[in-house]
Amino acid sequence: MLKIMGHHKFFSVFLLGAVTFMIIVTFVFWGIGKGGGPSSGKAGIVAEIKGEPISIEEFWRTYDNEYKRVREIYPNEEEIKKLNLKENVLNALIDRKVIIIAAREAGITVTEQELQNEILQLRYFQRNGVFDQQIYERSLQLNRLTPQTFEEQLKNDMLFSKMSRLIQETVEFTSTELQTIDSLKQANNQIAEAFRNSKNSQALKAYIEGIKRNMAIKVNKDLIS
């Protein structure tokens, strides 16, 4: 699920790949009612993984959200250009789709009860801390989404999170790495957590790159150039 995370500027570049990679930024309510990027009005498929498409609309929505997040860290446009956001976002979307496909093939699922509980807990749909059906329906209308479309996207986010956690739970830290984490905690717990997250992200990325070799992937970068 979407978690809006604050970042210390010292390690913001260090975390950028992981944040973009954990494609929770696709959640539509960061820019409610907002259109996509410069090509949002164009139909097209920017990538296809085992026959499952990533639309240009999904790309620009994700890009817009990630751009806004990065803009809070780097007000200088020249610094943002150096981050190569378009390519990072596209790669993150592809990696997300790969994980979701792998999760389905492994038999991992999200139950209707899990989905319902997640929706009820989302603050975007709450009034005074309680889920409000009218707010839910109005929010989706503003984003030109049907409940079916939104719930399918949310299911995929949850499926991605489940599979990612399973992979990361297998990560083993060396004694040296554990000592480094303990030392960092004494200085700055946030940096220690960034170190741990980096290793988890590396393990997840290695897993994805491994299964990518057996997946048919088509990319059309011309749509986002």
Image: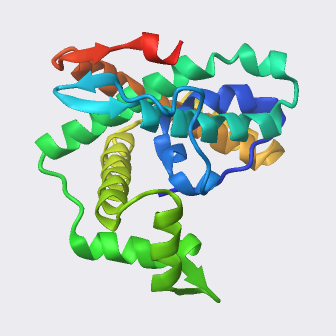
Residue 165 is situated, as x and y percent measured from the top left of the image, at 37, 48
- Depth check: give the residue in front, 16 or 176: 16
Residue 123 is situated, as x and y percent measured from the top left of the image, at 58, 74
The structure residue drawn at horizontal position 43% and vertical position 12%, both measured from the top left corner, is: 221
- What kind of colouring is applied to the model shown? rainbow
Q: Is residue 21 visible?
A: yes
State the residue lying farthest toward the front. 41
Left or right of 94 in this view: 7: right
Q: Is residue 67 above or below residue 107?
A: above
Q: Name which quarter of the figure residue 17 lies in.
A: top right
Q: Is residue 176 above or below residue 125?
A: above
Q: Is residue 183 visible?
A: no
Q: Is residue 32 above or below residue 202?
A: below
- Depth check: give the residue in front, 146 or 81: 146
Q: Is residue 218 above or below residue 182?
A: above
The structure residue drawn at horizontal position 25% and vertical position 20%, both measured from the top left corner, is: 212
